[in-house]
Image (spheres, rainbow, N blue to C red):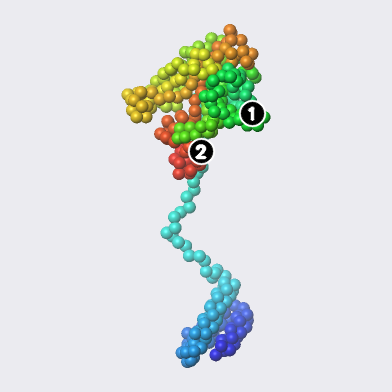
Amino acid sequence: MQSRVHEIRREFDRDLAGARDPEALERVRARYLGRRAGLLTGLLRDLREVPSAGRAAFGKAVNDLKAHVEEALEAAQARLVPGSAREAPIDLTLPGRVQRPGASHPITQVSALIEEIFLEMGYTLESGPQVETDFYNFEALNIPAHHPARDMQDTFYVEGGLLLRTHTSPVQIRTMQKRRPPVRMVALGRVFRRDSDITHSPVFHQVEGLVVAEGITFAHLKGTLAHFCRKVFGKGIRIRLRPSYFPFVEPGAEYDISCIFCGGSGCSRCKGTGYIEMGGAGMVHPAVFEKVGYDPELFTGFAFGLGIERIAMLKHGIDDIRLFFENDLRFLSQFPG
Ligand SMILES: [Zn+2]
């Protein structure tokens, strides 16, 4: 019986090879798979007659042949009858392919807003290296080697006496060295500190502003900060300055805005004070002017700085700074601007 199977297989292969048009192909199909007289159909019928001992082996041989015949017929059909190849079925229940438009990172968006506000006021945009020398990061900013302020900032030092800048203030020095007053500049960029928790990241972004000319006063500083904070957070914002100390300014101040959550009446976000800390500012220290060759008798100026993440966190109600650096699309896609 097995030899009969082989015989039919050989016959089929020969017949199929000879079929050169769709009609011939149909004849081959009928000869082997025809319901009544098909040779394969006959073989399956014969299965009943096979003694039970050999029935399984014979059944398998016939099934293998049937699979071969059907496959070969299908391939020949695709070849001889154009457009008959079976296409993958279309599953209408599959979800559509969503086009996800890209967007700027929330820090980039806030940076662009800050730049726009200062460019509108006639400031220039400046930048400087992220790997700095001790001179630009500390020395020129009135923070000499023995100064206790250096303990305030835990710095990443790199080879060759260089360091990762701990603030954007070195850009002030580089700009003043290049240019005579009047100077009106902002610098935005990355800064680095050895600090990491829910509100501190070892890398974050700062904006630094500097204005130097004849007759610049503390009132100019306050007016500028108030204008800036209202542009960012809304017209009703009030600012307040508190005395503070930074080596490169005198007098120095920290500035706060009226709480954007409660309007100043006191809530948990402002710890009941009605104010939220924003950053540091002050009048440029005469020692800094001397380092860059400006006459402190002739020129005065103010400087201010603040964290860009801090603005983004307040604006969007984000309470963990680390979210900005994790590149999690579930977070980032919430800022389509
Ligand atoms: Zn509040």
Q: Residue furthest top?
A: 297
SS at circle 2: helix
Q: Position of residue 192 (x, y in %)?
A: 55, 31
SS at circle 1: strand
Position of 100 relative to 49 (above/below): above
Q: Position of residue 182 (x, y in %)?
A: 59, 15
Q: Residue furthest right?
A: 160
**Residue 144: which quarter of the image?**
top right
Residue highlighted by disc 2: 325
Image point 39% across, 20% down: which residue?
238
Q: Say which of 108 and 275 sits in front.
A: 275
Q: Is residue 320 visible?
A: yes
- Residue 162's disc number: 1
Residue type pointed to by label 1: Leu
**Residue 138: which quarter of the image?**
top right
Image point 58% across, 89% down: which residue?
3
Q: Say which of 262 and 336 sits in front.
A: 262
